[in-house]
Image: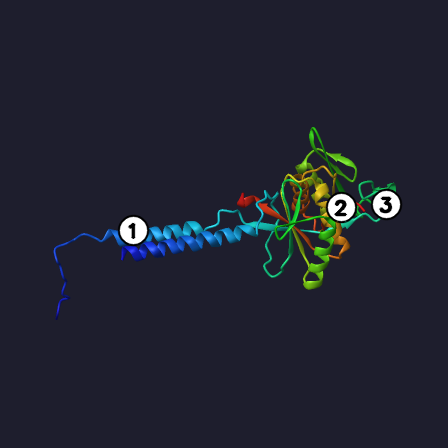
């Protein structure tokens, strides 16, 4: 019995660790701002998530982007999806000047639903 | 009536090792699958672009005259901290802003509230002002962008 339990145990640990790492790749660790009036995530929409890290770099799907590729990414997203919504996950220490271009590009592309990811005060 | 036959082979020891194996496995499983990240939520937001050149930061006198057309909250940032302006009148802090906004909204109007942070204002403060406006009961809170 004991060797089998050892092997099964090792396999379980292996799969858990690998799945955990795969999950972390999709989520840039940023310190989100805090708000109290936020709505829970709407799982029905598939927003385009733009990450802004603490040094004000923009990322879409863990790929760093600049202003021109941001524009094309938003247009591409808008063409591919019928519900258009942009979700900005920004670090709380980022100045507004790095968020403003995102908002402007979204507005120019005709995406009016821009959400800002926050932590609610209860979950701090 | 037959009484159930209980086998007593004399050893009263509970087999601990398999139980420990299973408990340990379950423990590892739940520790790995639990997420220690706080759940995230969304602040619904939208964008107000300045129609006139020069940006929404400077409302012209005729906009002040019809003050309930829209409420512009300017957020500036300097060494002494974050400064707030409600339609160009200085506001001491966030709770004063909240009471002022809810007083305006109690009149039964629902003007769009436009948050106009300076470029250097941190998102934490901008979102705090945004949140304060929503707490005061404003339906449409927008971030201003300058063309």
Residue drawn at x 78%, y 47% as measured from the top left: B70
Chain-order first, disc 2 or disc 3 = 3
Q: Are marks 2 and 3 on the same chain?
A: yes
The alpha-carbon separation of the residues under discs 1 and 2 comes to: 60 Å
Please state the chain letter of the residue tagged with numbered disc 2 in the rendered image: B
Q: With A18 as the anchor, is A76 left or right in this view?
A: right
Q: Is residue A121 left or right of residue B123?
A: left
Q: Residues within 10 Å of mark 3 (few under 14, many from 20)?
A: few
Q: CA distance from mark 2 to mark 3?
A: 13 Å
Task: State the SS at label 2.
Answer: strand
- Disc 1 chain ID: B
Using the rendered view, name the quadrant where residue B11 is placed: bottom left
Residue A100 can be seen in this image: yes
Q: Nearer the viewer, residue A54 or B134?
A: A54
Q: Disc 2 designates what residue?
A: B144
Q: In whole angstroms, how far apart are the C-alphas of marks 1 and 3?
A: 72 Å
Residue with the mark numbered 1: B20
Q: Is residue B108 visible?
A: no
């Amino acid at each position: 019995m004991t060797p089998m339990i050892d092997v099964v145990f090792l396999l379980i640990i292996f799969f858990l660790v690998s799945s955990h790492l795969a999950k972390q790749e999709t989520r840039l660790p940023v310190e989100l701002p805090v708000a109290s009036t936020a709505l829970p995530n709407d799982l029905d929409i598939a927003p385009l998530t733009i990450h802004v890290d603490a040094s004000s770099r923009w990322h879409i799907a863990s790929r760093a982007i600049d202003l021109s590729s941001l524009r094309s990414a938003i247009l591409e997203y808008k063409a591919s999806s019928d519900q258009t919504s942009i979700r900005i996950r920004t670090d709380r220490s980022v100045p507004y000047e790095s968020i403003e271009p995102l908002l402007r590009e979204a507005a120019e592309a005709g995406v009016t639903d821009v959400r800002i990811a926050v932590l609610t005060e209860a979950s701090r | 009536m037959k009484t159930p036959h209980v086998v007593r082979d004399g050893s009263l020891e509970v087999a601990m090792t398999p139980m420990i194996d299973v408990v340990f496995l379950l423990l590892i499983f739940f520790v790995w699958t639990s997420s220690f990240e706080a759940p995230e939520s969304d602040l619904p937001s939208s964008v107000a672009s300045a129609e006139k050149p020069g940006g929404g930061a400077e409302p012209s006198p005729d906009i002040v005259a019809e003050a309930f057309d829209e409420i512009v909250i300017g957020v500036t940032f300097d060494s002494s901290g974050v400064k707030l302006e409600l339609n160009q009148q200085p506001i001491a802090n966030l709770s004063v802003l909240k009471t002022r906004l809810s007083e305006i909204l109690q009149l039964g109007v629902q003007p769009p509230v436009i948050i106009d942070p300076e470029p250097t204002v941190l998102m934490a403060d901008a979102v705090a002002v945004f949140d304060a406006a929503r707490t005061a009961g404003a339906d449409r809170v927008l971030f201003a962008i300058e063309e």
